[in-house]
Image: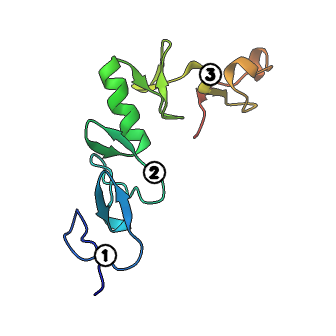
Amino acid sequence: MLFAPCCHQCGEFIIGRVIKAMNNSWHPECFRCDLCQEVLADIGFVKNAGRHLCRPCHNREKARGLGKYICQKCHAIIDEQPLIFKNDPYHPDHFNCANCGQEGSDCRCTGAERGAILPAMP
């Protein structure tokens, strides 16, 4: 007699790859972040209050609980004072000179050649 586990999400039998997580079995495509629905099978997850979350959602939830911001470039919690650009928070060192592309503190441009300091693209 053969045995095929049932998917915790859809209830169908699982033939092939099985994701075992949080005491359940899942189809890879059914194992998703409880908040954003990102497929977690190949990127991993963080257990958070009984939920399975992707790292960005976990960081947002953690930051919210601590009253902190999430950097829009690296998606990590900002422990120091954030730099706000167009209502989005960033780590202060994630801003680049528009002229040379170096992070603000590494920019050696002077005077008129120094470009605006803009958020670095992720």
In the displayed orientation, state which residue is furthest to the front: 1
| Label 2 or label 1, whichever comes before in sequence order | 1
Which residue does the numbered mark 1 point to in the structure image? Answer: 14
Badge 1 marks a residue whose secondary structure is loop
Q: Position of residue 102 (x, y in %)?
A: 73, 29
Q: Amino acid at mark 2?
A: Gly
Quadrant where the N terminus is found in the figure: bottom left
**In this view, the mark in front (2 or 3):** 2
Q: Earlier in the sequence, mark 1 or mark 3?
A: 1
Taking depth in this image into account, of 84 and 11 the one nearest to the observer is: 11
Disc 2 marks which residue?
44
Disc 2 and disc 1 in contact, CB within 8 angstroms: no
* Viewer-nearest of discs 2 and 1: 1
Under circle 3, the secondary element is: helix
Q: Residues within 10 Å of mark 1 (few under 14, many from 20)?
A: some
Q: CA distance from mark 1 to mark 3?
A: 47 Å
| Spatial CA span between label 2 and label 3 | 28 Å
Query: Which is more N-terminal, label 3 or label 2?
Result: 2
Q: Which mark is residue 93?
A: 3
Is 29 located above or below residue 12 in the figure?
above
Query: In the rendering, at what x and y percent does residue 15 appear?
Result: 35, 80
State the CA–CA distance, disc 2 to disc 1: 20 Å
Q: Amino acid at mark 3?
A: Asp
